[in-house]
Amino acid sequence: MWHKQDNEEERFYVIRDNFTMEFRDKKIEINEHEFLIVAKGVEHRPTAESEVRLCCLSMLPL
C-alpha cells in the first residue's frame, strides 16, 4: 500500500532476507544487514517476494 508519514521519517534495517522499497520514481532493493531512511512526506511502498525480518522505526526529526 502506498503511504507517507507527514511528521516523521522511517528507518528500516533488514535482519534477514531482503525487500524492495518502491518510490514513485524508483525502486531500491534493501538486503540483509542494510539500512534505509525514508524522509518524511515521501510516498513509498515496501514489497517482498517472501517473508522478511526487519526493524522499522518512525523517528520525529530533532
Image: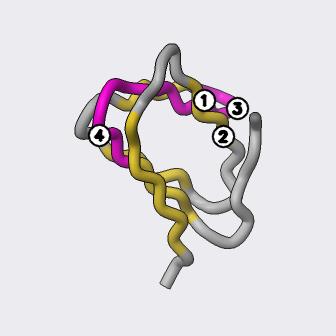
Q: Which residue is mark 1?
A: 22
Amino acid tagged 3: Arg
Relative placement, left or right, of 9 versus 13 is: right
Query: Who comes first in sequence, dot 4 or dot 2?
Result: 4
Q: Percent from the top left, x then y, of residue 55?
A: 40, 51
Q: Which residue is mark 3?
A: 24
Viewer-nearest of discs 4 and 2: 4
> Quick one: label 1 or label 2, which is nearer the N terminus?
1
Look at the picture and state if 16 lies above or below 49. Answer: below
Colouring:
secondary structure
Q: Secondary structure at mark 3?
A: loop
**Quarter of the rendering occupied by the N terminus:** top right
State how many labels appear: 4
Residue position marked by numbered label 4 in the rendering: 15
Label 1 close to label 4 by CB (< 8 Å):
no
Answer yes or no: do the residues labelled 4 and 3 have beta carbons within 8 Å? Answer: no
The structure residue drawn at horizontal position 51% and vertical position 71%, both measured from the top left corner, is 59
Q: Secondary structure at mark 2?
A: strand
Q: Which residues are magenta?
A: 13-26
Q: Is residue 48 above or below residue 14?
A: above
Of the two numbered discs 3 and 2 in the rendering, the one whose residue sits closer to the viewer: 2
Q: CA distance from mark 4 to mark 2?
A: 20 Å
The residue beneath circle 2 is 44
